[in-house]
Structures are given as C-alpha cells and as structure tokens.
Image: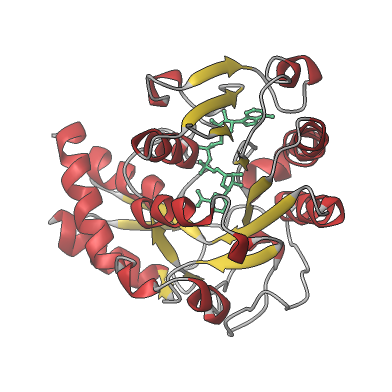
Amino acid sequence: MRKNILVTGCAGFIGSAISKKLIDNKYNVFGIDNLSSGKKKNIPKNLKFIVGSCNDQKTLNKFKNINFFSIIHLAGKVGSEISSYNPLMDCENNILATLKLLEFAKKTRCNHFIYASSMSVYGDLGAKPVSENHNCNPKSYYGISKLASENYIKISQNKKLKSTILRLFTVYGPGQNLDNPMQGMISIYLHQIMKNKKLIIKGSDKRVRDFIYIDDLTSFFMKIIGNKKFFNQTLNVGTGKKHTIKEVIKKLRIITKINFPVIFKKSTPLDQFYIFPNIKKLKKFINVKSFKSLDEGLIRLVFYLKKIYD
Ligand SMILES: NC(=O)c1ccc[n+]([C@@H]2O[C@H](COP(=O)([O-])OP(=O)(O)OC[C@H]3O[C@@H](n4cnc5c(N)ncnc54)[C@H](O)[C@@H]3O)[C@@H](O)[C@H]2O)c1
C-alpha cells in the first residue's frame, strides 16, 4: 500500500520539488501551504492540497484522520532579512507553526517528523567549518526560530515519534522564486543578471557560503523517509565546499556569458558572514560525491533560466 506523506510548504521552492519526487516514488502525497511566498502553480497535480497555515488548528484538522508515515516540515517564512522587519510574523510562522504541527504529528501517530532547519542556527563563527555539536548562537530572528523549532522537536522525540533535523545550507536550482529579492542568493543574482544585465550585491564579496543543488537535496530526502539510520539525528546538509561571493560572481560571468557590472551596497540586516559546514557526519550516512559541484549546478540552472529570460 502507498504510504501517506504530508509536505508542509508544498508550494514553495524545496517543498514543491520534494513533493514531485515523492509522487514519482509512488508515495501518497498531501500538502499544506498558506501561499504567502509559494505559488499554487508549483504544486504537482496528484497532491492532495489544502490552503492554510500550519499554525492554524482548523487547517491541520482537515487532515486529522490521516495516518502519516512521515511529515516533512518545510513551511515557514524564510530568511534573516525578512525576519528582521517582522520578528512576530517570523515567530508565528516558524516557531508556532512547528509546535502546532508537532502536536498534530503526535495525535495522528505519525512515525517520522523531518524538519528543514537552517545554517542560520549557528550565527557567525569566523573562518572555520562548523559541525553539528558546535554551540549555536543565532544572529537573526529567523535563526532563533529555527533553533527553537529544533529544540521543540528534540523534546518531542519519543518511542513513537522519531525525527530528523536537517540544517540546510544554501539551496539553489530551478523552481526558486525569481521575483523575491529577499530570498535565495543565487536566484536573486541570476534574476538581476539575466533580466537587467547588472548585479547589485548587498554585502561583502568576501562572504562565504556552501551551495547545494535542489536535485541533490530532493534525492537525499528520499533516502531519509522512514529510515532508522536517520532517526533522532541532526545533520548539516551541504556539499562541504566553501565559495566566496567573489568566486560566485566570476562563475556567473563565465556561465551566463554576460559581462555585467557589479554594484556593491550595504549588507542586508542580520546576514551571516562566514558560514560553511563540516559534513563529516553527513558522509557517514550518504555518499556526498554524487552532489553536484557549484559549476555543474550553475550550468544546469542557467540553461533552464535561458528558456525563461530569452
Ligand atoms: N532555500 C534555502 O536555501 C534554505 C536553506 C536553509 C533552510 N531552508 C528551509 O527550507 C524550508 C523551505 O524553504 P524554501 O526555500 O522552499 O522557501 P519557500 O519560501 O519557497 O517555501 C516556504 C513555503 O512555506 C509556505 N508557508 C510560509 N509560512 C507558512 C505557514 N505558516 N503555513 C503554511 N505554509 C507556509 C510559503 O507559502 C512557501 O510556499 C524552510 O523551512 C527554510 O527555512 C531553506
């Protein structure tokens, strides 16, 4: 019999990609999204969808009679910048939503709760890769919310409800919202380059990130669902390769073949400077050699975007 999976944030970048992959892998997929940043057109056809917020009990109750094999919690207000303008909204959509969903998971006897946390839980640590057992000192309201959610999840772990916390580093690829100037570094840059033939960078080009391609992430999720190895684990999820923004700009110039000017402006509020994962723990679970390099991912993404911008 097909297993039931609930994907929250199914209209968003990562949620829609995971939902498609789940349907391809013969899962019975249900979804919740309040469409605050996600788009209905992203949701795959065979998904049973309800519009609403995870922090709204009435919305959750619509699925109360379904026994979910797994809940993949991706819904949330994403990013440090947006959290700085409205911390209360951040708290409601990132903390409260997680807590309500956890209660729902317990009541509906869900087996495995998978949470998309973020590198933002760490804060700024200086020039060293960060491992999962490092102290978390979030710099933004968003980071605080992600860490609080992690803690609620950890305290809810028991024999019945298993969970996996994934600290995602910067995810990029087709499907990312191109019109949102506050979310997604690569999508923000490529939108400007391919549409306006110039690039405004907010912050230093010495900042460091690790970029993971969306297809690698969705394939990884398929390995986790209901897999005992991942129960009650917290994992950094990235390629383990660090890139400065300066390197990214250089790659984008070569791959897009557009000789765009770069204008530097002041940093966005609460942005992390140097953040790069130690992925030793991840390597014990999967073979990360299959992850695409940044060059390979960017070539694929630019090829995809040319159809949109040309
Ligand atoms: N994209 C990244 O680089 C990245 C990195 C680290 C962590 N994450 C995490 O992964 C998850 C998905 O991110 P994404 O990039 O797909 O963002 P996204 O904005 O594309 O998707 C989030 C989705 O959640 C929906 N949503 C927001 N609040 C909601 C609520 N209260 N109830 C129901 N739906 C709600 C939005 O409408 C949107 O469709 C987020 O939890 C984010 O914190 C993403």
| 177 sits to left or right of 169 | left
Q: Residue at x 59, y 53 (%)?
A: 268
Using the image, determine if residue 112 lies above or below residue 168: above
Residue, x 16% and y 40% (percent of image)?
A: 306
Measured as percent of width and height from the top left, residue 217 is found at 43, 55
Q: Position of residue 150 (x, y in %)?
A: 76, 55
Q: Position of residue 40 (x, y in %)?
A: 45, 19
Residue 251 lies in what quarter of the image?
A: bottom left
Residue 262 at least partly seen: yes
Decide if residue 93 is on the left or right side of residue 192.
Answer: right
Residue 281's image quarter? bottom right
Viewer-closest of 310 and 13: 13
Whether 258 is drawn above or below 283: the answer is: above
User: Is 278 rendered above or below residue 101?
Assistant: below
Q: Quadrant of ligand 1?
A: top right
Q: Residue at point 40% right, 26% down? A: 42
Q: From this viewpoint, which residue is outermost toward the right?
A: 155
Q: Which quadrant would the C terminus be assigned to in this image?
A: top left
Task: Report whether residue 259 is seen.
Answer: no
Q: Nearer the viewer, residue 274 or 213?
A: 213
Whether residue 203 sits left or right of residue 158 in the image: it is: left
Q: Residue furthest front?
A: 1
Rendered location of residue 188, percent (x, y): 40, 46
Q: As drawn, is 153 to the left or to the right of 163?
A: right
Q: Residue at x 54, y 74 (%)?
A: 276
